[in-house]
Image: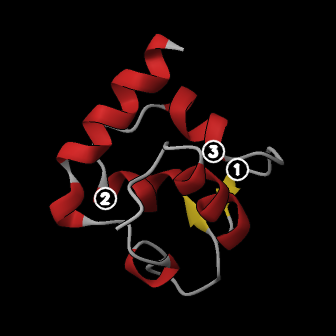
Amino acid sequence: MTKYIAFALGMGALATSAFADMSSVDTNGDGMATMDEVQAVYPEMTAEEFSEIDANGDGAIDETEMSDAKEAGLLPKE
């Protein structure tokens, strides 16, 4: 629980570079955000944090996982 709080606070501090929508992260336009694409926006994102957001474990964050992460406080809501 503590790591979630710390992560949420850290992400809140980055609200100026808001994870507004998939297009702000998905640089290749495939509808998915890979670890590299996410780290381009949030360089401090760890593999563990990414894995928590990547609910289906396919190595990429889709629109649903991104939305769920925002609702869970793992990413800023805007």
- Residue 72 lies left or right of residue 75; in this view the side is right
Q: Indicate whether 19 appears above or below 46.
A: below
| Image coordinates for residue 12, horizontal then vertical, percent | 26, 46
Residue at 45% from the left image edge and 12% from the top image edge? 2
| Image coordinates for residue 72, horizontal then vertical, percent | 59, 44
Mark 3 is surrounded, within 10 Å at the Cα level, by few (under 14), some (14 to 19) or many (20 or more) other residues, namely many
Q: Is the N terminus in the top left, top right, bottom left or bottom right quadrant?
A: top right
Are dots 2 and 3 in contact, CB under 8 Å?
A: no
Kind of residue indicated by mark 3: Ile
**Label ID, residue 59:** 1
Mark 2 and mark 3 lie on one chain; the one further toward the N terminus is 2
Kind of residue indicated by mark 2: Ala
The residue pinned by badge 2 equals: 40
Q: Residue furthest top?
A: 2
Kind of residue indicated by mark 1: Gly
The residue pinned by badge 3 equals: 53
Residue at 49% from the left image edge and 42% from the top image edge? 74
